Image: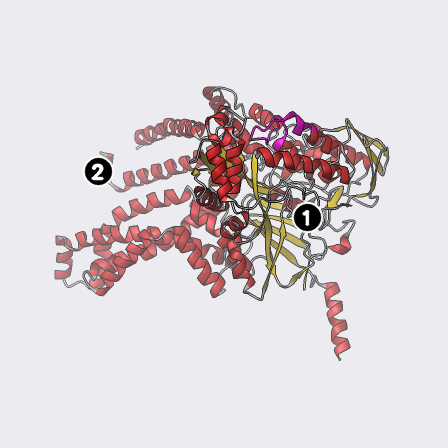
Amino acid sequence: MGDYLIKRLAAIVPTLFFVSVMIFGLQQLLPGDPAVALAGEDNDPNVVAYLRGKFHLDDPFPVRYWYWLDGVFHGDLGDSVRIQKPVTALILEKLPVTIELAVLAMTIALVIGISAGVVSAVLKDTKWDYAANIFALWGLSTPNFWLGILLILLFAVKLGWLPASGYVSPFEDLKANLAAMIMPAFVLGNAIAAVLMRHTRSAMLQVLSSDYVRTARAKGLDERVVVLRHALRNALVPIVTLGALQFGELLGGAVLTEQVFSIPGFGKLIVDAVFNRDYSVVQGVVLFTATAYITLNLLADIAYFLVNPRMRG
Amino acid sequence: MKVTRLALALVLCAALPCLAQTLRIGLAEDPDVLDPTLARTFVGRIVFAALCDKLFDLDENLKVVPQLATGYEWSPDYKALTIKIRPDVTFHDGEKLDAAAVKFNLERHKTMQGSNRRGELAPVASVDVLDPATVRLTLSAPFAPLLAILTDRAGMMVSPKAAQAAGEKFSLKPVCSGPFQFVERVAQGHIVFERFANYWNKGAIHFDKVIYQPITDSTALLAALKTGQFDLIERMAPSDVPALKGDTRFRVAKIVEIGYQGITFNIGKSERAQKNPAGKDPRVREAFELSLDRDAIVQVAMSGEALAGNQWVAPTNSWYAKSVPIPKRDLARAKALLKEAGVPNASFTLMTPTTPDAQRVAQVVQAMAREAGFEVKIQSTEFTTTLNMADKGDFEAFVLAWSGRPDPDGNLFSHLACKQPLNYSGNCRADMDDLINKSRSTVDAAARLKLFEQIAAMEAKDRPIVYLYHRHWLWGYTGKLSGLRMIPDGLMRVQNLRMN
């Protein structure tokens, strides 16, 4: 266990190094001079020259990368040029919003996706199965921004039940927070639920046709117990893996949904930063989300290691 | 009985904050840095209007009126401007605003690294404190746009003590002398200001708090107004106006902007200018202009929410040169000109930012110009990249919007004078430069207008920029809100706004 953990931890460093080089390098490929973008509409040559000097834009790529890496080693991810705020502060500001949105979306996705998948598998070839499949097709093929706008028009403008957009901290007003988050969380969760439903259905169909399920039924067990305790538990393994991956993606930010609902999370932060060529922010956020993603994967692997004795051999 | 109830209500109002009200404003974008010296976006100026008072302000007719100043006087040679400062003004941190603070601010604008105000105040050679309430700006040469420049960020005053203490981080907690003081900002989330109790004009303020929130999607912005989440939204999409006009709970206010929207041709910015007919031959640009029906462009691309124009200021502006009117569409003449130039099917690429407005304009222009024989290829390019390509001269024609400045010089000098930073066309004529420089140093309005007429005539002949129209600033707001002033600079003055 100890060796395994050390090996995995050691692999994190080169992975993050590779990620940081990639993101730094890819940004250089973006067309447009960041100094011109940051100088604003006045395009003052003095300001452009100042920004070039300040961000070492005239230095070669390795030198610029070194300046940035040096900052990272000193715990400094730099400042956002556009709003002059430290990138670390911006990440800490957005993190709770992004985590909350991801958790709510994932909860909705799991509840809808797994229930619909189980119902669809158990009641195969009935109207419930068809309905669940249509739901999955709808979820997979509906663009998030379009669904978001429709929900706003229905629940905010027509019915007046929910706010159209914006974010309120749960520590400030929990009710207002949930009211603001429910629509974006549903939009995100709806798409993931569709994927989960398809996977749950196929896994359940496979498990339900296996011998041990037939044995359980032959023993006279209640169908509910057979499905929920015996079949679903085994079918869940691939679902949990898929769910973890989807959750990791959500932590990277949901660009369009955040845009439509004006949720100040990572997605909006990074998109604005890319358009404004605010490189420190892009680099900082990507490094952070990559680290979070790798850490989540590591935790999942450790969990497998603990759960599955065969892996310890 | 009624009197008793009223008295009770008044007593309760005095005891409780029953008049406490929040003004919630929806912004079309997230502002940039909240430091008037470094700020560079239009949306940032909207937020500053509640936070930082300026030496001067503008009225509905773009006339310069005092704000933190009480008056001014030019020296006979117009090389010195003496400004009297309002005596009863304090900054949000309690520091007094006096002549020394004004000197500090103007020098900060001029010398701070990365200052976007340095160019605007370049003609100001020195600032002297004459007495605690009087400051004198000495200029290197007469400079007519100076007062108008001081109605914008260059005229905003920040607390010297706070600015010195915070240094580069001043924008994280800006301290000015406006009606509201900074409380908090969550980037892309919201900006909160609260009423400044010692504001010099506190009688004009009827809200306790102002909250700005950016929503970049125009449909979501409108929905937020309709659900009561906002009291006021700025820069509505023109296509959303009918939806709001049909609803009696809301109002739409509009005014013609001080900026312009046009097509800039590369006529000398780089070698590409000579490699396409539109860049090298003024007859082709004339044919192009004659192929356009500006009113139709306004109707189709902007849902009628703009004013057709052909100069750097709108026809409604007092600096508009009436002697150079908008040319009418003339397809026959356009075709004849193309034939004369030897390119009956002249072709050029039109670099177009990916914003919906710009895309629509490019498509309408493409269709109109085709009728005269032009083949316009639209090159959709992300906005930041367009700026860079324009700067390098890597384009043939470019759909460009300019938010505008109160003085026409802000729409002219940097855009058309030789080697200026916004002169993407590469236009460079000694005679035009001479006239532009004269217009900058001529303070007499009538004489200045005559110079503008000459410049407009030259520009209309060479057409480095084919100006198309001037957008309407469109604000949607609840019918309960009153006191809204429509100033052509598009900034929201919070003074005298109240909820009924």
Q: Indicate whether residue B433 is drawn in magenta.
A: yes
The chain under label 2 reads A
For residue A310, which numbered disc appears in the image? 2
Which range is magenta?
B416-434
- Of B403 and A168, the residue lying toward us: B403
Q: Position of residue A311 (x, y in %)?
A: 24, 36
Q: Is residue A281 visible?
A: no
- Of B346 and B57, the residue lying toward us: B346
Q: Indicate whether residue B194 is drawn in magenta.
A: no
For residue B50, which numbered disc appears in the image? 1
- Left or right: where A279 falls relative to A143: right
Quadrant showing the N terminus of chain A: top left
Q: CA distance from mark 2 to mark 1?
A: 66 Å
| Among the 4 quarters of the image, the one containing residue A287 | top left
Q: Secondary structure at mark 2?
A: helix
Q: Secondary structure at mark 1?
A: helix
Our reading of the magenta stretch's main secondary structure is loop
| Among the 4 quarters of the image, the one containing residue B35 | top right
Is disc 1 surrounded by few (<14), some (14 to 19) or many (20+) residues within 10 Å?
Answer: many
Q: Amino acid at mark 2?
A: Arg
Count all numbered tags in the image, as a single digit: 2
Quadrant showing the C terminus of chain A: top left
Q: Are marks 2 and 1 in contact (CB under 8 Å)?
A: no
Q: Position of residue B178 (x, y in %)?
A: 72, 46
In the displayed structure, A196 sits above or below B85; it is below
